[in-house]
Image: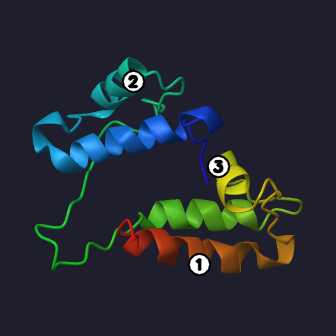
Amino acid sequence: MWGMPIGDNDWEIWGKLVMTWAQDRTKWPRDVADLNRQMAACGIKGQFDTGQFQNVALAQAPDATTIQIFLPTAQAIARATQNLKQPGTRWTLPGFYSRDAFDGAAVDVKEADNLKFLAERIGDYAIGQCG
């Protein structure tokens, strides 16, 4: 888990920016600096760390009959696993989950379930197809 640059009030804007890219490949960011410029132009307050990330890789299935499976890097999985093994580490999910899906109840993952939840989250977003 790394510092997510999308604030609680920016997820809708971020989603609309992602939808723009999905619908028009000519608007895909060329690198992280371009991604940060596009985010700022839309009013997103956070930025990706250009010291940690330099490139952007967008993946899109070629048609509606092809499933796109997003694979995180092995390093991202190792980093998340190491972080989640630290005593007292708790999952933090964007606030819209609590606000929009759970009637304001906090999303609370038990510490003992951190690695299980990691696997479930990876499985979910790897095949998330807007449906």
Q: Earlier in the sequence, mark 2 or mark 3?
A: 2
Residue 56 appearing in the image: no
Q: Mark 2 to mark 3: distance in Å?
A: 19 Å
Where is residue 20? Give x, y as percent: 25, 41
Does 80 sit left or right of 85 as displayed? left
- Which circle, 3 or 1, is nearer the viewer? 3
Find residue 98 and report its image quarter.
bottom right
Amino acid bearing label 3: Phe
Residue 117 appearing in the image: yes
Classify the position of the N terminus by image quarter. bottom right
Q: Which residue is mark 3?
A: 96
Where is residue 14? Give x, y as percent: 44, 39
Q: Earlier in the sequence, mark 3 or mark 1?
A: 3
Q: Secondary structure at mark 1?
A: helix
Does 86 sit left or right of 11 as displayed? right
Where is residue 47? Give x, y as percent: 48, 28
Q: Is residue 77 above or below residue 31?
A: below
Classify the position of the C terminus by image quarter. bottom left
Q: Which residue is mark 1?
A: 120
Amino acid bearing label 1: Glu
Residue sitting nearer the eye, 73 or 10: 10
